[in-house]
Image: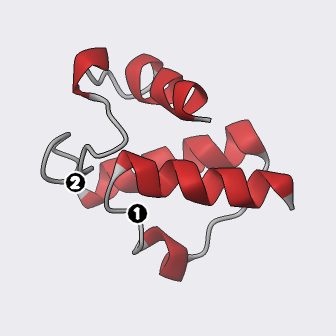
């Protein structure tokens, strides 16, 4: 899942691959703003066929948080 998410971040959001780690903070390390976070969520929803609630989005602090959420959601 990490590699799939990394592909989205690099290809769709122009994030430097070397900056992407499981511990990378979306806002602090990758300089995401609220619009970019919304874009990431939409891209993940489309790519993985999941729906992410607004409450769940608030838990996305790091790349690892998004990975874990997608892993759980895709398996269900």
The crowding category of the residue bearing disc 2, from other C-alpha atoms within 10 Å (few below 14, some 14 to 19, many at least 20), is few
Residue 66 shown left or right of residue 45 in the figure? left
The residue depicted at 12 percent of the width and 52 percent of the height is 28
Which comes sooner in the sequence, label 1 or label 2? Answer: 2
- Would you name the residue on which mark 2 appears? 33
The crowding category of the residue bearing disc 1, from other C-alpha atoms within 10 Å (few below 14, some 14 to 19, many at least 20), is some
Residue 41: tell me if it is visible.
no
The answer to which of 71 and 58 lies nearer the viewer is: 71
The residue depicted at 43 percent of the width and 49 percent of the height is 64
Asked which colour scheme the image uses, the reply is secondary structure
- For the residue labelled by badge 1, is the local secondary structure a helix, a strand or a loop? loop
The answer to which of 67 and 45 lies nearer the viewer is: 67
> Mark 1 and mark 2: span between their CA atoms?
12 Å
The residue depicted at 87 percent of the width and 62 percent of the height is 76
- Would you name the residue on which mark 1 appears? 60
The quadrant of the image that shows the N terminus is: top right
The residue depicted at 57 percent of the width and 55 percent of the height is 68
């Amino acid at each position: 899942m990490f590699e799939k998410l990394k592909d989205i971040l690099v290809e769709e959001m122009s994030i430097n691959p070397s900056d992407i780690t499981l511990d990378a903070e979306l806002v602090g390390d990758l300089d995401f703003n609220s619009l970019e976070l919304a874009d990431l969520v939409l891209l993940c929803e489309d790519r993985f066929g999941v729906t992410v609630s607004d409450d769940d989005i608030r838990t996305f602090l790091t790349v690892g948080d998004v990975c874990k959420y997608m892993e759980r959601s895709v398996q269900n």
